[in-house]
Image: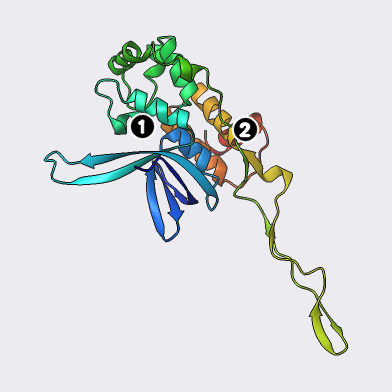
Amino acid sequence: MITKMTGVLTQVLDDEARLQLGAFEYQVLIPETVRMRLQLRKGQEVTLHIVEYLEGNAGGSRFVPRRIGFNTETELDFFELFCTVEKIGTKKALRAMARPVKDIADAISRQDVKWLSTLPGIGATTAEQIVTTLKRKVAPFVAVSSPAQPEVAAPSAVVEEKESKKTKANGKTKATESEQPATAVTTDDSAITGRLIEDVYEALMGLGHNPIEARTRLDDLLTCGKPFKTLQEAITLIYSQKG
C-alpha cells in the first residue's frame, strides 16, 4: 500500500493532480484545499500523503484503483474520520473538504450546522449527522495549525538567460568567467505565498461566494498576469475583472 508519493507536479486539474515519478505519471485525486496549495507549483517536486481505495461499478465486475493525496498526514487522518459518517463516501468527503481542516473541525465542535451546510455536497440533514457522529472526535484537529507554505513563482515570473561571452586570445576563442548557466530570477512583486492564496479564498467565501465561485475568481486572479502583494490588492483586482 502506498502511503506517500514524491514526484514532479505536471498538471493540476479541477479535482486531481498528476505526478511524474520516473517513467510513470500518476493520477492523484485531491480536495479543493490541496488544489489551492498546489496550483502554482507546477514543474516542482512535491510530496503528497496518500490513501488508496478501489472504485467499482454497481455490478462489482470492474474495479479501478484510486489514490487520494493530501499535503499533510493531519489532512489525511481527518478525511478518513470524515468518511466514517453515515452516507458520506469517499467522493462526497473529498468534495466537501473545500475549507481547511481546522475550520471544518471547529465548526463541528461548535455544532454549527449552518456553516457545515455551506460545504459542497453537504445539506442540512447531512450536516447534522456529521455533528452527531464527530463532535467528540475532532478536538485534535481544532488545535492544528496551518502548514507553512513555501514561496512560489507567479505565472508572470521572468526567466532571464545569460549569454556566454567569448574573447579571443592568441588567435583562439575561449569562454570568459562571466559565462554562466541559465538562471531563473523573479522580482519581489512576483512572489506569492500559499498562505496569501488561502487568505484570498477565505475572504471570497466570507463575501458570500460559494466554493465554486470563489475558486473560479481565484483562478482568474492567478492567471491575469497582474501582481499583488496583499489581500486587499488581490480583492481589488478580482472585482475589477468581474462584477
Name the spot of residue 201 as percent of width and height, x first.
52, 30
The mark total stands at 2
Question: Which marked residue is nearer to the observer: mark 1 or mark 2?
Answer: 1
| Picture quadrant of residue 28 | top left
Q: Position of residue 26 (x, y in %)?
A: 38, 51
Compare marks 1 and 2 and give the one earlier in the sequence.
1
Name the residue located 85 percent from the left edge and 90 percent from the top edge: 171
Q: In the image, what residue occupies the spot 41% across and 31% down?
A: 76
- For residue 236, the mark is 2
Q: Is residue 92 above or below residue 118?
A: below
Name the image colouring. Answer: rainbow
Report the side of 106 relative to 153 (left or right).
Answer: left
Q: Residue at x 55, y 45 (%)?
A: 40
Query: What percent of the width, then of the height, locates residue 210?
Result: 43, 27
Q: Assign a secondary structure to mark 2.
A: helix
The numbered mark at residue 95 is: 1
The answer to which of 19 and 219 lies nearer the viewer is: 19
Q: Amino acid at mark 1?
A: Arg
Q: Secondary structure at mark 1?
A: helix
